[in-house]
Amino acid sequence: MGKVYLTGAGPGDMELLTIKALRVVKEADIIIYDRLANPKILKEAKNGCEFVYVGKEDGRHTLPQDEINETIYQSALRKDVVVRLKGGDPFVFGRGGEEGSYLKKRGIEFEIIPGVTSAVSVPAYAGIPVTHRGVAVSFKVITGHEAPNKKSSQIDWESLKGDNTIIFLMGLHNLSKISKKLIEIGKPKDFPIAVISRGTTKDQKVVISTLEGVVDAAKGIPTPALIVVGEVVKLREELDWFKV
Ligand code: SAH
C-alpha cells in the first residue's frame, strides 16, 4: 500500500509552494489535483507520473467529495507515492480533514503538508495585512458559501460585530447578501471592503470599495476571489507592492 500526501499547493504563485510540497510532487507516482492548484506545478512531476483532475470551484466539485475520497484510496492501493494537491492549505476549507479520516479508517498512511493559504497571502499580495498594530488585533476566516439568511446557517453573524478583519472565502456569489448582512448587524455603509480575484497571479485584480458600493464595483470580477472586510483594507494605499 502506498502513502498519501495531502498537500497544499499555495494560492497561485508557483514560488509560494513549500519545499516539502515540491519534493513530494517530484516523487509522486500519481497526483490528484484541483482547479485551484497552479498547473505549472504538475510540470515538476517525474516521467510516468499519472495525473487525475478532480476539479473544484467555490466548493463545487467535478467529482463529489466521496468519490474524491475513494479515488485517493484506490490510488494508494496501486501506487506508492500519492499526492493529493489542493489549492492553498489542505485544512483551510480544503476538505483535507475528510480525506485524511477516510484514509485512516482504511488503514492508509498519510501525511499533511500545509500550504500557504489564500486567506492570508492573497490579501498580502494586494497590500492588505490581515492584522496591523492599532488597526486590527484579530482576523477571522469564514466560508461565504452559506447564504447569510439561511435558517440552518452555522455562522453567528452577530458575533462579527466587533471583529477587526473578516475574510470570506467562496463568497463571491453571495457578495450582495454578505455586504447587506454586515450593514444589518451595524457596520457602517462606508466600511472598507476589498474583493481580490486570482490573487498572487499575473491575473490578480483588486477592487476596493465600501459595503454599500461593492456589488457594483466588483461586477464581473472572475473567480477564484476572496473578500476582505475591515479598516486594514485602507492600508493598501501605502502597502500596494505587487505589480502584475
Ligand atoms: N484551501 C484553500 C481554500 C479553498 S476554498 C486555501 O487555503 O486557500 C476556495 C476559495 O479560496 C475560493 O473560493 C476563493 O475565495 C479562495 N481563493 C483561493 N485561491 C485564491 C486566489 N488565488 N485568489 C483569490 N481567492 C482565492
Image (cartoon, rainbow, N blue to C red):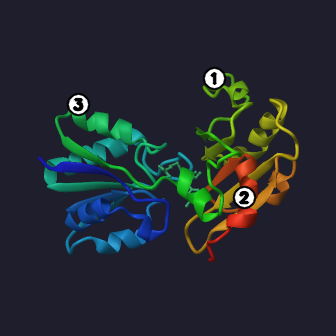
Q: Tell me the number on the disc at residue 105.
A: 3
Judged left or right of residue 183, residue 78 is left
Kindly identify the amino acid type of the residue bearing the numbered disc 2.
Leu
116 vs 174, nearest the viewer:
116
Q: Is residue 211 visible?
A: yes
Circle 2 SS class? helix
Q: Position of residue 99 (x, y in %)?
A: 33, 40
Q: Tell me the number on the disc at residue 152.
A: 1
Q: Does the beta carbon at disc 3 come under 8 Å from ligand 1?
A: no
Q: Residue furthest front?
A: 134
Q: Is residue 218 visible?
A: no
User: Disc 2 designates what residue?
Assistant: 235
Can you say which quadrant of the picture contains the C terminus?
Answer: bottom right
Q: Position of residue 213 (x, y in %)?
A: 86, 52
Kindly identify the amino acid type of the residue bearing the numbered disc 1.
Ser
Q: Position of residue 233 (x, y in %)?
A: 72, 54
Q: For residue 243, which quarter of the picture? A: bottom right
> In the displayed structure, would residue 7 be above or below residue 242?
above
Judged left or right of residue 38, residue 6 is left
Kindly identify the amino acid type of the residue bearing the numbered disc 3.
Lys
Q: Position of residue 224 (x, y in %)?
A: 59, 58
